[in-house]
Amino acid sequence: MTVSLEKKVLTNAGLALVLLGALSAVVFWSATRSAATFRQVDQTHRVLYQAESVLVDLLTIQSATRGFLLTGDPRFLAPYETAAAKIEPDIARLGELAADNPAHRPAIATLRQAATEMLALTRERVAVRRRSGLGAAAEPAALLAGKKQMDTVRALIGALEAHERSLLATRSADSQAESARTSFGVAFGGLAAVLFLAVAAWRVFRETGQRVQSEEQLRLTVESVRDYAIIRLDPAGMISSWNAGAQRIKGYAAPEILGRHFSIFYPAEKNAAGFPPQALAVAARDRRFEDHGWRVRRDGSRFWANVVITALHDPAGQLRGFVKVTRDITEQRASQLALSESEARYRALFDSIDEGYCIIELIFDAQQKPVDYRFVVVNPAFEHQTGLRDALGKTMRELAPEHEAYWFETYGRIVLTGEPLRFQNRAAQLHRWFDVFAFRFGDPADRRVAILFNDITRRKEAEMKIAELNTDLRRRTGQLESANRELEAFSYSVSHDLRAPLRHIDGFALLLQKNAPALDAKSRHYLDTISRAAKQMGRLIDDLLSFSRLSRAELRQTRLDQTALVESVVRDLRPAPDHPAVDWVLAPLPAVQADEAMLRQVWCNLLDNAVKYSAKEARPRIEIGGHPDPATGGTVCFVRDNGAGFDPRYQDKLFGVFQRLHSAAEFDGTGIGLALVRRIITRHGGRTWAEGAVGRGATFYFSLPATPVADLQPALPSS
């Protein structure tokens, strides 16, 4: 059957139409897939960038916290607060970008929880540092918790990025495959156009329209990206396209930058070294070039950039230009530098501390009993503190075979329970005492313990020596107290035993004086001398008894009005009938804490002395006063007279028992009064002293503390 030409043409035309229709469908499908793949690639880049932003925020928080904990410098808190404010919005943005991938939702939720916990922990550490200082802030458990949280964050972000990079590789491969299929379709369509001119022309026109539309969509997508500067360069490096991200990062508007060479973004020193052309040459050769370094904005400011230059080749392998993608990572670099500086400071602290520090790994036997440990970390001070050399990597049994089991059991208990322990113990084979703080380090399965310790051998030896001295001191104190009790008992007994013969002597002298008219003058003089001596001896015994009673009396301190007390003492004084009238000058006296009876005795003795030693003056003047003591914050009181005075060379004898600077013929007395004053004031925690000159009067001082003190000479028991 003969087929007409018209039918053949129609048949061929129909077949061509069917074929070209099928080819057009394939081309259209490939172009659509290419655009979709590009959008997916861009979405993956956005997710990766946002994940890096979250990681940068957390690294900034960590490094700023460490910087503040180590230095206490509040400047570290500025980047901390900035990152803390950004972290939640950044995580939320990451969740929005990754919303099309359900596999990421649990990881992002876990990331958000870990970031919240890390932020809470760092805020708590900052508060502790402000309140209690470095020692409390650098608590090992808190530092370990922070490290674990950061490790968790790194693992989550690392897993997310790994997944996205896997998707990126897959999508890039799909894009290349789609590009290959599209090229094949175009070539086949051209051949079809030669065979079927009319139909091919129509298909080519339609395909061209679709491609223009796809490229327009791609251009719009690129221009809308703001976090990356995406720039198209021609083979010579001239800028041919400019997106919104490039304008935001570099500061140039499209009209003022298009057509200029991309070297404008590099510092002068880079341009002088010929770096930009070299970068293009490497990209053209290797198809890709990546660099980190300083770049220059329109206003002259610099930023640290991550730059990737990708060469664009046509199917024939001819270089058509480059795509340059730039990301501003200045904040990330600053965080990394701060973290590096923080770690360097930590290492410097680790290497410079005087305390020994080590990390040990416990070794257990088959019955899970700790029998040894190995040193896995030691600091420079370790050898000085322990005397052990080249300990790293060795076991304790290798270094000290006779090391006590107590140490292994203690560290084994810390590994198993996780409870930190502070203790002191002696290592017999090392001949040293140690003050130790130990805590479990790292994963419990690693069975490691971190130990901070000090050699306290000298301190322990000193403590034992002090204990021996204290024992000897208590023994000697007991002997002294016993001797004092015996002396007091002797004084009291003698004073009582002497009274009886004195009463007899004085009584018989009085009886003889009744017969005085029958005696001659010499005999009467003898009787007067005997009587006066007996009375003087009685007064001496009374004073000795007072001195003895003072040692047995209990000190009862109350708040006293000294002015009223002194006025009462002055009223009770009974000067001799022939004593000239005294000019009393009494200034207001400060109130004090003292025993009232004892302080009255002090004033009685001092004022009685002043009256007695000013008796030979025509107009005796006695001045009484007091003032605060600037040296101690207590009170100083004084009694000043214009009487006989004393030779300052002998003032140390004034307050001694039975010590007198004037003879009994000049001034009556026993030499006990000032000794009583000194003992009373000493028991109150004060002191006594005097100033004077012969014939120019004397001033006697005593001081009392601002607050009551313990009795410096507790009362002795009565014998």
Image (cartoon, rainbow, N blue to C red):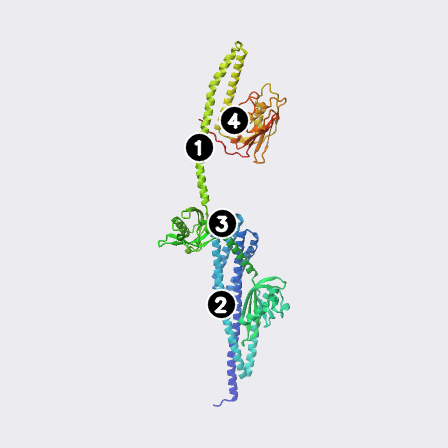
Q: Evaluate if marks 4 and 1 touch, with contact meaning CB atoms under 8 Å apart.
A: no
Q: Evaluate if marks 1 and 3 touch, with contact meaning CB atoms under 8 Å apart.
A: no
Q: Give the numbered dot on residue 354.
A: 3
Q: Amino acid at mark 3?
A: Asp
Counting from the top left corner in percent of width and height, residue 186 is at 53, 78
Q: Evaluate if marks 4 and 2 touch, with contact meaning CB atoms under 8 Å apart.
A: no
Q: Nearer the viewer, residue 428 or 17?
A: 428
Q: Give the numbered dot on residue 657.
A: 4
Q: Nearer the viewer, mark 3 or mark 2?
A: 3
Counting from the top left corner in percent of width and height, residue 152 is at 47, 58
Q: Nearer the viewer, mark 4 or mark 1?
A: 4
Q: Nearer the viewer, residue 373 or 634?
A: 373
The Cα atoms of the two marked residues, 4 and 1, are separated by 24 Å
Element on which disc 3 rests: loop
Q: Give the numbered dot on residue 478.
A: 1
Residue under numbered circle 2: 167
The Cα atoms of the two marked residues, 4 and 2, are separated by 105 Å
